[in-house]
Structure formats: C-alpha cells, structure tokens
Image (cartoon, rainbow, N blue to C red):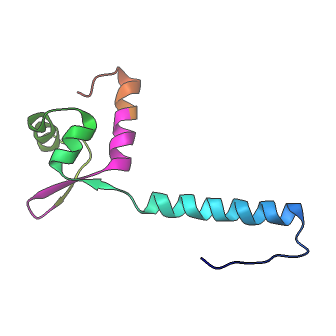
Amino acid sequence: MKRLIIERLTVSDLKTIIGEAIAQGLKQRLSEDEFFNVEQASQYLKMPVTTLYDYTSNKKIPFHKKGKKLHFSKHELNAWMKSKNKQGGDYE
C-alpha cells in the first residue's frame, strides 16, 4: 500500500474525501453481487432443495439459469425474503 503525506488539508476536505471513498466502496460492493448454486441457496434460505426447485419451477423465487444450472443472487434472495416477511412471514 502506498503512503501518502497530506499537508494543508482542511477537516472538511478530509471528510469529503473519506465520504467519497466510502460511497465508491459501497457502490462497488453492490455491483459485485454474490451468487449461490442450488445447494448454497438451500442452506442460505434454510429450505430443502426440493422446495427450492419447486419454487423455481413455479417462478415463486428469483433465479438465473445458465444452461441447465440454476444460480441465485444473494441480493435478490434477501429482497425476496424481505418482501415475503412483509406479506405474512411464510415463503409461499
């Protein structure tokens, strides 16, 4: 890591620089979404794989399909779980 010596920088300037760095880091993190395979999504959601397959076949849960493989975005699963909790707590 490079060392940087900063002189004549106001507190306000430093706050701005730090704020921009944090915002950029958060933006980058959101764009680098984590994806799960079926087994990982099953563990993450604490539901049987068979239920997960049923949900995907009935389009009850967000998923992505590449070839024959299913992939689940962690970000989309979190949003899906939050929406289901608001609707009454059950995932069905």
Q: Tell me if I can see residue 73 in this picture.
A: yes
Q: Tell me if I can see residue 60 in this picture.
A: no
Nearer to the camera, 85 or 25: 25
Q: Is residue 45 above or below residue 1?
A: above
Residue 73 image point, x, y percent: 31, 52
Q: Is residue 5 left or right of residue 49?
A: right
**Going 63% across and 59% down the picture, which residue do you hit?**
22
Does the stretch in magenta take in 70? Answer: yes
Q: Is residue 11 left or right of residue 60?
A: right
| Number of disc labels | 0
Residue 41 image point, x, y percent: 23, 44
Q: Is residue 27 above or below residue 78?
A: below
**Going 19% across and 52% down the picture, which residue do you hit?**
37
Quadrant of the rendering where the C terminus is positioned: top left
Residue 74 image point, x, y percent: 34, 48
**Going 35% across and 34% down the picture, which residue do you hit?**
81
Residue 89 image point, x, y percent: 33, 21
**Going 71% across and 59% down the picture, which residue do you hit?**
19
- Please state the extent of the stretch shown in magenta in the rendering: 66-81
Q: Is residue 87 above or below residue 66?
A: above
Q: Is residue 7 left or right of residue 84?
A: right
Q: Is residue 3 left or right of residue 92?
A: right
Quadrant of the rendering where the N terminus is positioned: bottom right
Nearer to the camera, 68 or 47: 47
Does the stretch in magenta take in 85? Answer: no
